[in-house]
Image (tube, rainbow, N blue to C red):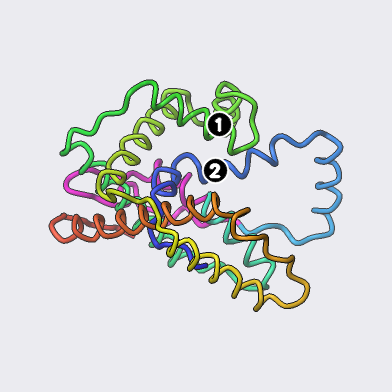
Amino acid sequence: MKGPLVNKKLLISLGLVVSLPFLAACSDDDADESADENSAEQEPAAPEPDLESIPDVVAVVNGEEILKEDFVPAYESQFQQFAMQAQATGEDVDEEQLKQQTADNMVSNELLLQEADNRNVDASQEEIDQTLNDLATQNGLESADEFIAALEEQGMAEDEVMAQLENQVKLDELIADEAGDTEPTEKELRELYEQAEAQQGQAGEEAPEMPPFEEVKPQLEEQAKAEKESAAAEELVGKLREDAEVTINL
């Protein structure tokens, strides 16, 4: 099923979470690294993103600047993912389009955070700690300290990580408030299941057999809630953009 255009977890993640798939690679042992190096010798070098043409102020959102130093890590993370896909398909990365997409996402992120501040949305330390622990678990790390240490190895200071997490909590609360009741009905879950079944059928005989509805119902519920929240976030961003003063300098 096609994902929503605006994913609330991906907005803040431009500065934090998107870089996390790299953590798995960092955790490999020396033997794996040696094997990767030997393999890399037989493969063409990965493309490098063009960073020189990025202006010092990438965008201005209601007077708040999005700086190059904040844009570059987000763009590099996006570029790495698209470059891997491009290598698999033999196509080049459309850097201009990718820069615009990254900037648009960061503008949306800034608009939502400004709206959270306007509504006096607060983030408690307990909620921040819970988000930190959840992210550590999602990335296969054993503790919050290990998660922070891994990000520090990538150049993110601990106070920067915590500031990102605080924003993430504010964003979650804002969108939850905007989305309202996201509990899916049985009919909605059945429809999601039927869509997944149809996709499995299109994949051919090699596709694994679809599990029974009751077995995957919890995952379907999470997916349905996430889609409703993402739709609410997308609609809110659209409304905020109507009255916002946004300049993108790319």
Residue 161 x/y as whole percent: 45, 29
Q: Tell me if residue 152 comes above or below residue 188 in the rendering.
A: above
Q: Is residue 200 magenta?
A: no
- Identify residue for label 1: 151
What is the three-letter code of the residue carrying label 1? Answer: Leu
Distance from the alpha carbon under mark 2 to that under mark 1: 9 Å
The boundaries of the magenta stretch are 48-76
Q: Is residue 115 above or below residue 221?
A: above
Position in image of residue 186 (x %, y %): 44, 59
Q: Which mark is residue 19?
A: 2
In x, y percent, where is residue 97? 43, 67
Report the side of 10 relative to 65 (left or right): right
176 up-or-down from 226: above or below:
above
Q: Earlier in the sequence, mark 2 or mark 1?
A: 2
Quadrant where the C terminus is found in the figure: bottom left
- The picture places residue 242, in percent across and down from the top left corner, at 16, 61
Residue shown at 67% from the left, 57% from the top? 46
Residue, x 72% and y 78% (percent of image)?
A: 204
Q: In the drawing, does residue 245 fall left or right of residue 3?
A: left
Amino acid, disc 2? Ser
* Residue 49 highlighted magenta (yes or no): yes
